[in-house]
Amino acid sequence: MAAQLLLRLGGRLESVSFTQSVCGLLGARQGPGPWHTHCSLERGQLVLSSNSFLGASERLPIQRPLFCPFAALDQQPEVSRTEPLTNRGVDLGVAVILQSSDQTVLLTRRTCTLRISPNLWVPPGGHMELDEEILECGLRELWEECGLQLPQNQISCVLLGLWESAYPPRLSWGFPKYHHLILYVLVISQESQEQLQARIQVNPNEVNAFMWLGPDVAAAVAATEGGAETPGPLSQDLPLSVCATELRGDGGTQPLLLPMPTLMRTTPTTAEGDKERVSAGTKFALQLWLQHLGR
């Protein structure tokens, strides 16, 4: 069973239906955000509120893309009533921003055969199970997707923020089939990038490549989803490409050079076969990571 999302609205705990915008219910207005929410997680329930409440353990930024289909549905309620998915809720997920001792972070490329967000660069992550702790879920997903086992006494972790995610990501692609709230958790390892890289064994059913980003490249990538349809010209200080590792058909790996323009692509307005790019939520998480580094 999956963990449950509840909102504290007007003093009452309420579930969220599939077509409702979580950010909207928490009081988000039109504009870029992010907003902040108080939250607690216990007994398989994540409780969010725009106001502080007894038992709230964190106050985190929460964000959605400017093109969030659920925000658009809030303005078009007649559309949601015609769809058969209104009895579904919002799924909870955890994604791990794994930081090496070199201050680089790990991203993975989802295989092109996955039903949700194929061919996108994202942090390792997945659904939170009932009664599962946030870090426990994140470390489980890191093991399942990348073969990395990290002893909890050799890491530290920080909750970074929440992202409201839809797939397809825009109404112009079609009515959303999936609605997730993703909790990004920063896991800081004492091992170097080289040490972690040597132990990575990706699950070929979910991941077909991985790479490490440093702060400079991460900042450039994170800045490209601010509403512009096409990213601006590359800074002369940035590399033309980023080194990654790709899975071969025989199960081995090979080097992969990723052009910077690929990483800086924004979410297209029409479905284009899910072109390779870094997801909008991942860019938000990279911004939060950089802010944490700055502190």
Image: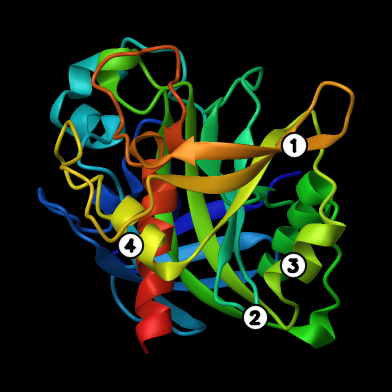
Q: Is residue 172 above or below residue 89?
A: above
Q: CA distance from mark 3 to mark 2?
A: 10 Å
Q: CA distance from mark 3 to mark 4?
A: 22 Å
Q: Residues within 10 Å of mark 4 (few under 14, many from 20)?
A: some
Please report contact status of discs 1 and 4: CB closer than 8 Å, yes or no. Answer: no
Residue highlighted by disc 1: 254
**Circle 3 SS class:** helix
Disc marking residue 91: none
Dot 3 or dot 1, earlier in sequence:
3
Residue type, label 2: Ser
Which residue is nearer to you in this view: 172 or 104? 104
Disc marking residue 219: 4
**Circle 2 SS class:** loop
Q: Is residue 91 above or below residue 60?
A: above
Res 35 → quadrant: bottom left
Residue highlighted by disc 3: 194
